[in-house]
Amino acid sequence: MVTLVIIVVVGLLTGIAIALVSRWFGVEPNPVEEEVRNLLSGANCGGCGFPGCAGYAKALVAGAAKPGACSSQCAGAAEKMAKLLGVAVVHKEPKVAVVFCSGDDMKATRQALYNGINDCRDAMIVAAGAKTCAYGCLGLGACARVCPFGAIEINEHRLAVVHKEICVGCGKCVGACPKKLIKLVPKSAEIHVHCMNPVRGPEKFKACKAACIGCGKCVKTAPEHVKLVPGAALAEVDYGNPPPEALAEVCPTHALRK
Ligand code: SF4
Ligand code: SF4
Ligand code: SF4
């Protein structure tokens, strides 16, 4: 009983001491910073380039950042923030993540069966995963698990797919993919070459029927929108001048698609 009373008294005294010290020496919350922070989404995704929403709010108040860098903010919030801080909004071009692989289980072959931990990074340790193509999506969802907005789905044929209408382009998934298959691209781009394998066409077509075989049909049809990667049997979209959706029709393997 005596021990219990001592523990309670010591606990109370410690609590009071901590409260007094933080009152005397603690930093007063900055009301403008609080207001700015309340205008941010609270997703803490880091897409603004700062360590979370609090870091961005601090930088905004200090004049080290401009409103408009938060891609997950509600409409009009950046303008409200700019008014509050007396600065101009700098709008970023909206970006979205794209998984540059089309090799789902229906189109791509496997070199082995993987029954280990259900994560792409773990599967990667075992002979770089089960897919025959070294650039194939492993479909175990490491990217989907880190997305704070639930924008990535692993489809029924074990391929990661980004829902463009949900993705805010924060970039968290980019670093999570051990195959480096995810890139941020302008949201306005309608179609992409969903393949990153640079090897000879026949070789990769054997491993994946959805590979870009480097036939050059898209490049011949629209050289102003698509080009061949130097030294690789692979086409890539010019994101400075992206192609119209209709160009996808010329691609024999459908690697060029939405
Ligand atoms: S898909 Fe990637 S870029 Fe898009 S919101 Fe999710 S983590 Fe961010
Ligand atoms: S895109 Fe990368 S992280 Fe996502 S499921 Fe495929 S291999 Fe895994
Ligand atoms: S048409 Fe398709 S397969 Fe041929 S180079 Fe273009 S993206 Fe690759």
Image: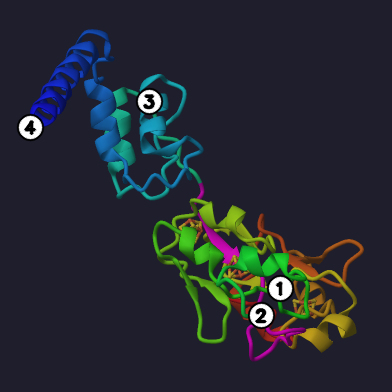
Residue type at the position of mark 3: Lys
Quadrant location, the C terminus: bottom right
Residue 175 lies, in percent from the top left, at 60, 53
Q: Where's ligand 3: which quadrant?
A: bottom right
Helix, strand, or loop for circle 4? loop
Nearer mark to the viewer, of 4 and 3: 4
Of the residues shown, which amino acid type is indicated by label 2? Tyr
Instruction: Identify the residue shown where x is 48% and y is 35%.
Output: 50
The tag on residue 114 is 2
Amino acid bearing label 1: Gly
User: Which residue in the protein does label 4 denote?
Assistant: 1
List x then y, in percent, for residue 200.
Answer: 90, 77
Q: Is mark 1 within 8 Å of ligand 2?
A: yes
Mark 1–mark 2 Cα distance, whole angstroms, equals: 7 Å
Q: Is residue 22 above or below residue 171?
A: above
The residues tagged by marks 3 and 2 sit, at their Cα atoms, a distance apart of 46 Å
Q: What range of the chain is rendered magenta? A: 93-114
Splitting the image into 4 quarters, where does residue 182 fall?
A: bottom right
**Residue count near mark 2 (Cα–Cα under 10 Å), binned few <14, some 14–19, many ≥20:** few
Q: Is residue 67 visible?
A: yes
Query: Horizontally, is 24 left or right of 59 in the view?
Result: left
Cβ atoms under marks 1 and 2 closer than 8 Å: yes
> Which is closer to the viewer, label 3 or label 2?
2
At x 84%, y 76%, the residue is: 214
Q: Amino acid at mark 4?
A: Met
Q: CA distance from mark 1 to mark 4?
A: 60 Å
Of residues 139 and 45, the one drawn nearer to the viewer in this rendering: 139
Q: Which mark is nearer the camera, 3 or 1?
A: 1
Name the mark nearer the viewer: 2 or 4: 4
Marks 3,2: beta carbons within 8 A: no
Within 10 Å of disc 1 (Cα), the crowding (few <14, some 14-19, many 20+) is: many
Q: Indicate which disc residue 58 carries.
A: 3
